[in-house]
């Protein structure tokens, strides 16, 4: 599984063992539990692609899943809603990936989408949600002949304007949380939105990790069945 930030999957991986490896000049921490591995590659398409490549090189997985937070484009979706999109679209070039299961469409966009941008993406692609990573993970998987899937959770609703965070994200996709917090601290008009985002993110993380637990059980059962084990 490839996530952007550790806080997205923290409830799932907190007791898993870890190993650190270097890939293309960057150090990655892999969380391992049996045959399941999670890496947090950072925010954005390029960090996600590099993390997926590192995962594939290190572990040669049969299946790779993009997991994490999305912004809702469908006004009916609420924070904490879990999505398993059938189609992932890269807004950069319009390329599409069929995950083979699930329903609906997720579009990957190159920057944080505020309320107006969400409306445009919804009209352009008919997508239910937007993220910044899934399409890049899909492309890395396809190039290496690895099956791809996505499991996402809504952290911000369609009418929610995310506080400006992009200038606090480095080229490696890592969020400088301390600088962002300092930026918000001296701007009272950002407090309400930031508090709401933190609250919804915590809710989303719990919902995602619960869904991932169930997903892993289903995968394990499917593997046992396929192998003819009783």
Image (tube, rainbow, N blue to C red):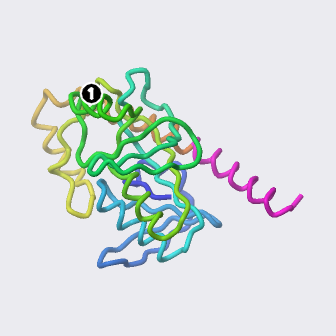
Give above or below for 148 relative to 144.
Answer: above
Q: Residue furthest right?
A: 230
10 Å crowding of disc 1: few (<14), some (14-19), many (20+)? some
26 vs 111, left or right, is right
Q: Quadrant of residue 211?
A: top right
Q: Which residues are magenta?
A: 210-230
Q: Residue furthest left?
A: 186
Residue 178 or 171: which is nearer the viewer? Answer: 171
Q: How many marks?
A: 1
Quadrant of the image for the C terminus? bottom right
Which residue is found at the position 58% from the left and 47% from the top?
212
Give above or below for 93 relative to 107.
Answer: below
Position in image of residue 122 (x %, y %): 32, 30
226 vs 25, left or right, is right
Residue 170 or 65: which is nearer the viewer? Answer: 65
Is 218 inside the magenta-drawn segment?
Answer: yes
Which residue is found at the position 31% from the left and 74% from the top?
26
Give above or below for 75 relative to 62.
Answer: above
Residue 146 or 41: which is nearer the viewer? Answer: 146
Residue 127 or 134: which is nearer the viewer? Answer: 127
By secondary structure, the bulk of the magenta-drawn segment is best described as helix
Which residue is found at the position 34% from the left and 46% from the top?
108
Q: Residue furthest top?
A: 76
Residue identified by numbered label 1 = 119
């Amino acid at each position: 599984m490839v996530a952007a930030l550790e806080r997205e999957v923290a409830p799932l991986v907190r007791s898993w063992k870890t190993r650190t490896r270097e890939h293309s000049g960057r150090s990655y921490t892999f969380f391992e539990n049996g045959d399941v591995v999670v890496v947090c590659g950072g925010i954005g398409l390029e960090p996600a692609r590099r993390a997926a490549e590192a995962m594939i090189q290190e572990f040669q997985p049969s299946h790779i899943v993009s997991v994490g937070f999305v912004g809702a484009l469908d006004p009916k979706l609420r924070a904490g809603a879990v999505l398993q999109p059938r189609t992932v679209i890269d807004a950069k070039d319009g390329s599409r990936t069929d995950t083979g299961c699930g329903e609906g469409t997720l579009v990957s966009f190159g920057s944080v989408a505020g309320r107006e941008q969400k409306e445009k993406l919804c009209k352009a692609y008919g997508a239910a949600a937007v993220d910044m990573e899934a399409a890049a993970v899909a492309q890395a998987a396809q190039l290496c002949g690895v099956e791809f899937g996505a499991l996402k959770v809504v952290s911000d609703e369609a009418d929610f304007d995310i506080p400006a965070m992009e200038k606090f994200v480095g080229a490696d996709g890592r969020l400088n949380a301390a600088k962002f917090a300092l930026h918000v601290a001296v701007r009272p008009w950002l407090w309400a939105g930031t508090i709401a985002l933190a609250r919804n993110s915590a809710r989303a993380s719990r919902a995602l990790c619960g869904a991932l637990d169930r997903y892993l059980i289903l995968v394990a059962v499917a593997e046992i069945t396929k192998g003819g084990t009783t």
